[in-house]
Image (tube, grey):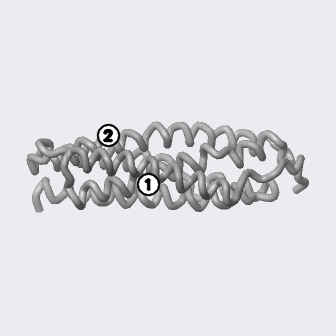
Amino acid sequence: MTLYSIILFLHVAAVLGLFASLSFEVLSLFHLRRASDLSDVQRWIDPVPGIPWLAIGSIFVVLLSGIYLAVRMSAFEMAWPKAAIVALLLIAPLGALTGKRMRAIRRNSAEASKMMKPELLSRLHDPFLKISLGIRIAVFFGIVLLMAAKPELWQSITIVVGSVVLGLLLSLVAWRRTGPLPARGELQR
């Protein structure tokens, strides 16, 4: 076993970790947007504790191991590794903004006694949560496409930009389809 094979394993494992964290976020957001009472919110706000740390750790491992692998393969002469790094760096701030909003939901649900307040309802139906998640998933798959296809500069840029646009459009279509739920006032537990 070589250092290269260990780093490659860590890279693939971190990609799987990032995929798992995005999958749990999809599950959590799906149930949070449909929560009818406070116990539903508290159940789905953290379906698996530590998922945000898995996502953060996975991004760092993917970034560092990816740089090492690209250097070892002399791939930095090509465009796709640079585009993949830029795309990965797009995921991080969107995830951080989402994390900030999820912490606010967690705080609102902890402060609520037995009723869901209108502020909590509006936070649960914040369109940014769905848009951010849609863009991050599309960019994640765009990065996988970059790694598999190894395209030239303009194709790499097109893949990254196309991933962002596709993620935005798909999340907007999904948001319009489900739409923001009408204000229901406070719901009893």
> Residue at horizontal 43%, vertical 54%?
138
Residue 79 or residue 38, whichever sits in front: 79
Q: In which quarter of the image is the N terminus?
A: bottom left
Q: Residue 177: image x %, image y %?
A: 67, 60
In the drawing, what numbered circle is on residue 187?
none
> Residue at horizontal 62%, vertical 53%?
46
One can see residue 43 in this view: no
How far apart are the two marked residues, 2 and 1, measured between alpha carbons? 14 Å
Q: In which quarter of the image is the C terminus?
A: bottom right
Categorize mark 2 by other alpha carbons within 10 Å: few (<14), some (14-19), many (20+). Answer: some
> Callout 1, which amino acid?
Ala
Categorize mark 1 by other alpha carbons within 10 Å: few (<14), some (14-19), many (20+). Answer: many
In the drawing, what numbered circle is on residue 86?
2
One can see residue 180 in this view: yes
Residue 82: image quadrant is top left
Disc 1 on helix, strand or loop? helix
Mark 1 lies on residue: 138
Residue 83 or residue 14, whichever sits in front: 83
Disc 2 on helix, strand or loop? helix
Q: Residue 2: image x %, image y %?
A: 10, 58
Q: Residue 186: image x %, image y %?
A: 89, 48
Residue 175 or residue 91, whichever sits in front: 175
The numbered mark, 2 or 1, whose residue comes first in the sequence reads: 2
Labels 2 & 1 near each other (Cβ < 8 A): no
Answer with left or right where residue 141 lies relative to residue 135.
left
> Residue at horizontal 67%, vertical 38%?
104
Answer with left or right where residue 19 lies relative to residue 183.
left
Answer with left or right where residue 168 lies relative to residue 179.
left
> Callout 2, which amino acid?
Val
> Residue at horizontal 32%, vertical 53%?
143
Q: Residue 13: image x %, image y %?
A: 32, 59
